[in-house]
């Protein structure tokens, strides 16, 4: 079910009208992006699986990227930092012109990892902008739904790799647990925004040793 324009997103969170059924539903990315554009700028680093304790035994977590050196017009996940069983992962956009926003989903194995929260990136902040971030990671375990859009009325040119946002996970057990980027779209600044063609998407795997 797609979110209609009469179900405008409340600031900083998804409308209750947007649901994901077993990870099979495609995200209404354009509708989500338009709702973000019209919402007041907001952010925050929460929306996490609060109350999740540490792993039962000491673990060293990491993230292994599918594409550690991404080329132009790619969205990729790469490790940002790690501490014991917690790892932070950049979701970065590389060398893409005239960008207005992005929407995508991250799917992961809840048997091996838990989503803890997010922090803002730098990709859409150029020129003093205050983008809207909508990140929902609790209503459907194993899936984080993300929408980010500029609110300044202008696009930005991404030079090199810049983080759209940073996600934090706790690895629960020893093993390798694949992470995938799904239903992803990067948007230009037309009215309404249109998908930028030929974007490539790369994720990776959370690991515990």
Image (cartoon, helix red, strand yellow):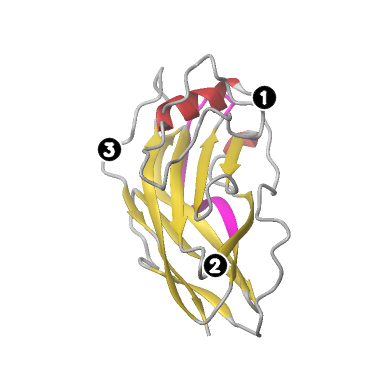
Mark 3 Cα within 10 Å, few/some/many (few <14, many 20+)?
Answer: few
For residue 198: magenta? no
What kind of element bears circle 3?
loop
Dot placed on the residue nearer the N-terminal end, 3 or 2: 2
Q: Position of residue 69 (x, y in %)?
A: 38, 66
- Which residue carries the number 1 mark? 40
Does 95 sit left or right of 199 as displayed? right
29, above or below 201, in the image: above
For the residues labelled 1 and 2, the Cα–Cα distance comes to 32 Å
Q: Position of residue 25 (x, y in %)?
A: 37, 39
Evaluate whether residue 127 shows in this view: yes
| Residue 197: mark | 3
For the residues labelled 1 and 3, the Cα–Cα distance comes to 28 Å
**Residue at x 34%, y 32% (from the top left corner):** 195
Toward the viewer: 67 or 145? 145
Q: Position of residue 97 (x, y in %)?
A: 39, 39
Dot placed on the residue nearer the N-terminal end, 1 or 3: 1
51, above or below 152, in the image: below
Residue stretch rendered in magenta on the structure: 151-168
What kind of element bears circle 2?
strand
Q: How many discs mark residues in the rendered view? A: 3
Q: Position of residue 153 (x, y in %)?
A: 54, 22
- Which residue carries the number 2 mark? 113
Which of labels 3 and 2 is toward the front? 2
**Residue at x 36%, y 66% (from the top left corner):** 67
**Residue at x 66%, y 85% (from the top left corner):** 58
């Amino acid at each position: 079910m797609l979110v209609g324009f009469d179900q405008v997103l409340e600031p900083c969170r998804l409308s209750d009208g947007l649901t994901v059924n077993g990870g099979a539903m495609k995200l209404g990315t354009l509708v989500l992006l338009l709702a973000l554009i019209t919402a007041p700028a907001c952010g925050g680093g929460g929306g996490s699986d609060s109350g999740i304790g540490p792993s039962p035994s000491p673990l060293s977590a990491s993230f292994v990227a599918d594409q550690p050196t991404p080329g132009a017009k790619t969205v990729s996940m790469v490790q940002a930092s790690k501490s014991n069983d917690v790892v932070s992962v950049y979701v970065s956009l590389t060398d893409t012109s005239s960008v207005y926003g992005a929407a995508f989903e991250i799917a992961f194995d809840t048997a091996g990892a838990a989503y803890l929260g997010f922090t803002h990136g730098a990709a859409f902040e150029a020129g003093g902008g205050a983008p809207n971030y909508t990140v929902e990671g609790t209503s459907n375990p194993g899936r984080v739904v993300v929408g980010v859009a500029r609110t300044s009325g202008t696009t930005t040119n991404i030079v090199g790799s810049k983080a759209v946002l940073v996600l934090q996970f706790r690895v629960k057990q020893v093993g390798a647990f694949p992470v995938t980027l799904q239903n992803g779209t990067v948007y230009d600044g037309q009215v309404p925004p249109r998908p930028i063609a030929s974007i490539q998407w790369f994720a990776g795997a959370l690991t515990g040793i």
